[in-house]
Amino acid sequence: MTLEEFRLLRDHVYSHCGILIHEDMKFVMERRLWPRLEALGLLDFSAYHRYLRYDIQRTAELEAAVESLTTHETYFFREPAQLKAFCDELLPILEKRNARTRRLRVWSAGCSSGEEAYTVAMLLKDSGRFNDWDVEVYGTDLSRRVLAVARRAEYGPSALRATPPDLLERFFVPAGLNRVRVRDDVKAWVSFGHHNLTDEATSQLLPRTDVVFCRNVMIYFDQAARRRVLAVIRDRLCPGGYLLLGHAENLLSLGADFELVHLRGDLVYRRPDLLGGEGR
Ligand SMILES: C[S@@+](CC[C@H](N)C(=O)[O-])C[C@H]1O[C@@H](n2cnc3c(N)ncnc32)[C@H](O)[C@@H]1O
């Protein structure tokens, strides 16, 4: 792969989904995309770039290319301190605020194979606050492959490595050797859909939500792509709704229009509510 070919492919991936691959990852890109060239019978990366731009199969191939370049690392009950702050400090606020509508919406944006969305649904069930409410947790991701895993809801030891034993007992049923399946009443609160966070137009079709978990997704984006995604998230959040990022992420220097909220157990972000909740 020449440097020029690398840059063409990098820019193509970036403009599709915001993921920016640095120049020192050129050899990784080359190694990961080479099987695609072989599968298509193409001789070099210039031909592959032309295929991605002009071939009738270009959309499917771009998905395959991005799939081979992205990481989907995730597991149940990731970042427990943040989840505790969510349960102890945000859920009481949301219960009070939405008491009239008895509706709660949570979006797991960049949900990978579903562990984060199911974790949230389990925490909502476990809190006992929303059991007769209209609750929906929806997970979205760019990768159709991981969404298929999410919908199947069957997991092995790696996904469960941080799951407390009592929650494992309560929210999963056995599903064969070393595998478990998410219980049906948890699944009933969760749905999944394909969505590109950098696509402002299709984002308009997503429902308004009370909380967004967007953890460990924007770390692969540059500042410009982060700004675009944050505008999408802000637009889909109800006024006063909360945004939870991964522990290595923050909105510093992005000039994003969110308030920083100091919880006892975590820092989270909130869409300003200019009407003080009167608008709902
Ligand atoms: C490392 S996983 C994080 C999963 C989960 N949020 C967590 O923290 O455990 C990042 C996910 O973001 C998804 N992703 C990356 N770019 C995206 C985009 N532009 N739109 C939607 N999802 C994206 C990837 O496909 C991947 O599944």
Image: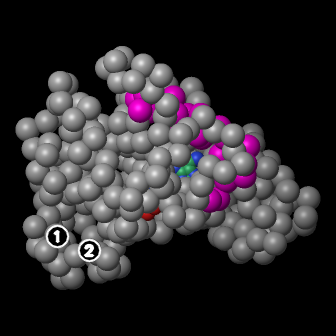
Residue 65 shows up from this direction: no
Q: Is residue 201 above or below residue 15?
A: above
CA gap, disc 2 and disc 1: 7 Å
On-image quarter of the C terminus: top left
Q: Is residue 228 magenta?
A: yes
Q: Secondary structure at mark 2?
A: loop
Residue depicted at x 73% and y 43%: 224
**Residue visible at 62% across and 49% down?**
251
Going by the image, does 97 lie left or right of 42?
left
Q: Is 142 situated left or right of 116 in this image?
A: right
Residue 116: % across, % down: 35, 58
- The residue carrying mark 1 is 167
Q: Ligand 1 near label 2 (Cβ, under 8 Å)?
A: no
- Magenta residue check for 80: no
- Element type where label 1 sits in the image: helix
Residue 171 appears in the figure: yes
In contact (CB < 8 Å): disc 2 and disc 1? yes
Instruction: Locate residue 96, reporting x and y percent.
Output: 21, 35
Residue 216, image x, y percentages:
53, 60
Q: Which mark is residue 17?
A: none
The one nearer the camera, 20 or 277, is 277
Residues in magenta, as a range: 219-240
Q: Quarter of the image holding residue 240?
A: top left
Q: Is residue 185 left or right of residue 192?
A: left
Q: Relative to 94, is 64 above or below?
A: below
Label 1 beta carbon less than 8 Å to ligand 1? no
**Amino acid at pointer 1:** Leu
Which residue is under mark 2?
A: 163
The amino acid at mark 2 is Thr
